Amino acid sequence: MASAVVHSLLALPGPERLEALTDLVVPEFRATLRLEPDEPLSVEARYFELGLTSLQLTEIKKRLEKVLGVTISSNVLFNQPTVAQLTTYLAHDALPGTSADAAGPNTRDRALLAEILPELNQG
């Protein structure tokens, strides 16, 4: 069941949803890293480059699961090794309907279509 946070995201116009989700995810990383509000946080840097440990990532994952009301596989953290990639994954795959292109296929579906369509066009 979607959390109240997810319902709030869905109420936003498409282009604002990913930004709002980022606004939820980034503070979890900032708090764990004990960053001051004016200290920069690179959403493109890998977690370990930011100084995070596996234990800290697990804690962030648990907090995000609670806030968003979804289960996030630990593998996701290793396959999506930056804050930006994690947020995009959450928007497109974990929280269907929260991305700007919510009406379109999710990331996995787009990859599959890209693989299959050339074969269909040849036939």
Image (cartoon, rainbow, N blue to C red):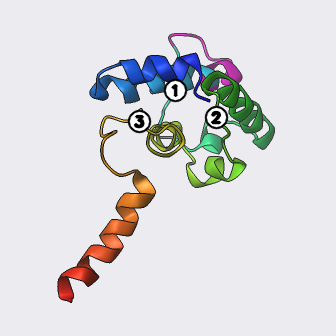
Where on the picture, by quarter, is residue 58? top right
Is residue 33 found inside the magenta-colored segment of the image? yes
Disc 3, SS: loop
Disc 2, SS: loop
Residue at 26% in and 74% down: 117
Residue 89 placed where, x, y %? 49, 44
- Front: mark 2 or 1: 2
Residue 45 placed where, x, y %? 52, 41
Alpha-carbon span between mark 3 and mark 1: 27 Å
Q: Nearer the viewer, residue 57 or 119?
A: 119
- Front: mark 3 or 1: 3
Q: Quadrant of the N terminus?
A: top right
| Amino acid identity at mark 2 | Val
Residue 65 placed where, x, y %? 67, 31
Residue that numbered label 1 is attached to: 41
Where on the picture, by quarter, is residue 16? top left
For residue 70, which numbered disc appears in the image? 2
Is 33 placed left or right of 36 in the picture? Answer: right
Alpha-carbon span between mark 2 and mark 1: 25 Å
Residue 116 placed where, x, y %? 33, 76
| Amino acid identity at mark 3 | Gly
| Amino acid identity at mark 1 | Leu
Earlier sequence position, callout 3 versus callout 2 = 2
Extent of the magenta region = 29-38
- Residue lying furthest right in this view? 55
Residue that numbered label 3 is attached to: 97
Q: Callout 1: few (<14), some (14-19), or many (20+) C-alpha neighbours within 10 Å?
A: some
Q: Callout 2: few (<14), some (14-19), or many (20+) C-alpha neighbours within 10 Å?
A: some
Is residue 45 found inside the magenta-colored segment of the image? no
